[in-house]
Image: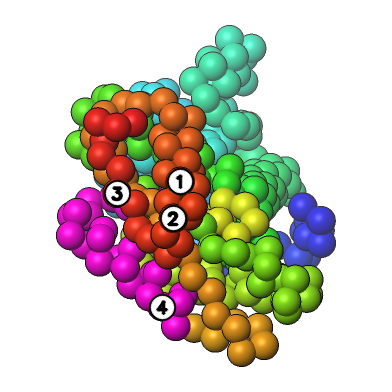
Amino acid sequence: MEGQDLDPNAIEYSKYSIHIVEDSPLVITALLNVLEPKNYIINSSSNGKEALEAINNNKPDLIILDVEMPIMNGYETITKLKENKKTQNIPVIFLTSLTKPDVIKKIFNLGASDYISKPFVAEEMLARVEKEIKNIMLQTLLKEKMSKLAELLSVDALTKASNKMHMTSIIKTNLKKIRDGQIKSFSLMYIDVDDFNAFIRANGINATDATIKKIAMIIKRSIRDKDILAHWHGDKFMISFAQISKDELDDTAKAIRDKISKAPFGLNGHLTCSISIVEITSDENINTIIDKLQNSIKLSKETNKGSIVKIMDCDI
């Protein structure tokens, strides 16, 4: 919430919508007189049944709900709201002339966020509504912070591709999907730059970051939007592919290898890369898969750098 001002004067009331469910036109008018000057977006219904349909079609930020109404009372209405995944998290303030302890207990047990006694005092109404709006603001800010944190935890700071932790999670998720029968297969590609340490010795340590970023950019431009690229570590990358044919996977590997070999790096230098690819069709151990991808490249580099190694699923 750092940098966010929760002073009432800072709330942009016009961004928030309130749905009033009340059968008395006089009470609705009184509520409008109190709330409209704050520029809330306000809609209303005269009974619970009407409200459920309206709220389902136009989800508000807050509901003010009368207890005693014809056709469907407030108790029935909030029960229906809480049973619906689309509306169950909308905060509800009950409006009631029934203030006995058992009534108040029932109101909160049904999931109400707060209640206001009839006849209501304007200042109290505004304060309780504003409290719920502030809670909504805080929840929104928290979700934004959590989303940004999740992004930071999953994105490689240098290349802006996914990081090793995120890719590991993706592989585990896909293996589970295979086990559960949700997908039939997925493919992985492991890319290892050849002689990268020698290149850095020739061009200086300061060339490392720029070179890795450029390689990541070349790879990113060679794959589909739905494919996921990760900077595995150092000069190594991993790509996860969903729904890709073997021919398309082969063509992608060749395109990446050729584009990297043709691109200029450092002081008129060039680089090559070795690639291993595998289509996974069964629930295998993730460490076994990764070891096979890495070891196959290691063996290939001993005799033929810049090669593409295809691993059969049965070899894992």
Please give the residue where the numbered disc 1 appears in the rendered image: 299
Q: Report if residue 125 is visible in the image.
A: no
Tell me residue 219's x, y (percent).
44, 69
Q: Which amino acid does label 2 sit on?
A: Thr
In the image shown, does 102 or 210 lie closer to the viewer? Answer: 210
Q: Is residue 244 magenta?
A: yes
Cβ–Cβ under 8 Å for marks 2 and 4 = no
Q: Which of marks 2 and 4 is nearer the N terminus?
A: 4
- What residue lies at 54% left-to-right and 33% top-to-bottom? 94
Residue 225: assigned label: none
Check disc 3 and report its element: helix, strand or loop: strand
Closer to the observer: label 3 or label 2? 2
84 relative position to 238: left or right: left
Q: Most extreme residue toward the front, as rendered? A: 303
Tell me residue 62's x, y (percent).
52, 46
Give the vertical position of 165 relative to 251 (above or below): above
In the image shown, does 187 or 90 lie closer to the viewer? Answer: 187
Cβ–Cβ under 8 Å for marks 2 and 1 = yes
The magenta segment: 238-262
Q: Is residue 163 magenta?
A: no
Please give the residue where the numbered disc 4 appears in the rendered image: 259
Residue 310: assigned label: 3
